[in-house]
Image: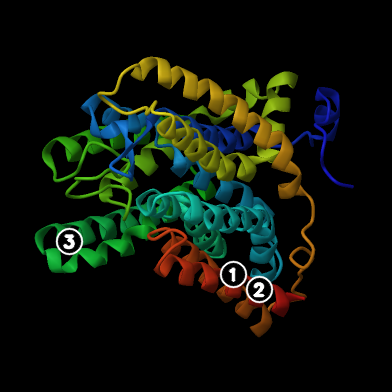
Amino acid sequence: MPIAAFPTVADVTAATPVDRDRAIDVIRITALVGVVIGHTVMATSIIRGGVFYWENLLTTAAVFQALTWVFQIMPLFFFAGVAASATAYGGPWGGWLLKRCTRLYRPVFYYLAFWFLALLVARRVLPVHVYEPLAGISIQLLWFLGAYVLVLATVPLLTRISTTGRLIVAVATLYAAVAVIDVIRVHDPDWTWLGYANLAAWLVPGMFGVAYRYRLLTRSNATILGAAMLAVNIALARFGPYELSLVGIEGQQLKNMTPPSLLLAGHAIMMCAFAIALAPTIGRWARRPRVWWLVAIGNSGAMTLYLWHIPALLGVHLAFDLLGLPRYPGQPHFVALSIAQLALMVVLVAALFVALRPLENNPLPYWDGGTVDGPGPRSAAVGALLCVAGATTLAAVGWGLKDLGLYFVALMLAALVAARRLAS
């Protein structure tokens, strides 16, 4: 049955298993809502001389950069996702990963179709230096999906972290490896490319997701670890080569986000440790019927919320810019325009969530339904193709839907189609 209308509070409560870990659901949706709010509040733009400038308030003041230590909560999505996956993992690897990717990529097909059509129109009606940045921004947020799929592919390995000792060794080894790579790329610019090996830092929240599921850390130990990592991170930012902002901005010598730095790896450890410490409290709070209803509804359209807020945000900014009302530092009525755009975004995102949430939940013909019967070469091939899809998704965001980005998106789609065909 198509999922269109929202269930009632009573329906959601009745459908929720007694042993459901509600804290994980709260953490997951909170991470995505935080991203949406952060993008909306921080984004600035202006059209000057026929050129579209898409920038960020982080470039204007150190206080905004410091706030990224609170609002850079994407590691928590990886933490929550792996915590849930560690429980659900079973069966052949390729088939299990395909089941996860089926849900994740289902709304992406619609999203890409929208952008291809929108950019065809935009190329005809917008100046080239407005169109080009727009095409570049269009799929930037898909970096998360590519990285997340690659992390999910390692869940069979991550679930072997079944003791506190193994957790310490795994996290310390990865943290040390990121540190070594940072030292190399800071001291020798010819090795800057090596920094992309630090994408493995996204395994850190996955490790803590497994640690949470297996209860490898007590609340007190998690609190101590979080506080210790906060102190280490402050020292790295104060005395090391690291930038204050945990979100990449123009002009940074050593970005923390792309590729991940030691500071971001430490931030992930800190955030996940505090999440483990607070999880029981969060879980109790989520047992309130109305709170749980909001969390459940939000999670049922999490990818919808994440994907479609970017077209809405770009549309709002373009409209204001073309009307001569840019929300940009130094321009008139900045505060009033900020409030107006925020209010408009609330309405647009809510409308898109209601309208497009069914696309995320209803089966997509020719995509849903793939299965792998058992372990073996077919399972391995399906899993490998999905890893290729994740890697090319991650690579495409560097260009967006133009130039090399188009080739990477084509490779991503080809890998997804091949995996699905092989599974069927």
263 or 331: nearer the eye?
A: 331
80 or 333: nearer the eye?
A: 333
Q: Earlier in the sequence, mark 2 or mark 3?
A: 3
Q: Give the residue number, with chain letter if any, for mark 1.
A: 413
Which image quadrant: the C terminus?
bottom right
Element under label 1? helix
Element under label 2? helix
Q: Give the residue number, with chain letter if any, for mark 2.
A: 417
> Height in image: 167 above or below 177?
above
User: Quadrant of the rendered structure where residue 189 is?
Assistant: bottom left
Coloring applied to the structure: rainbow
Tell me how far mark 1 sits from mark 3, CA to CA. Answer: 33 Å
| Percent position of residue 354, x then y | 72, 34
User: Quadrant of the rendered structure where residue 321 is?
Assistant: top left
Q: Residue at x 83, y 31 (%)?
A: 7
Dots 2 and 1: beta carbons under 8 Å?
A: yes
Q: Earlier in the sequence, mark 1 or mark 3?
A: 3
108 or 227: nearer the eye?
A: 108
Q: How many marks?
A: 3
Q: Residue furthest right?
A: 1
Q: Which mark is residue 284?
A: none
| Percent position of residue 338, x then y | 42, 21
> What's the residue type where badge 3 is placed?
Arg
311 or 64: nearer the eye?
A: 311
Side (left or right) of 418 relative to 141: right
Side (left or right) of 35 relative to 416: left
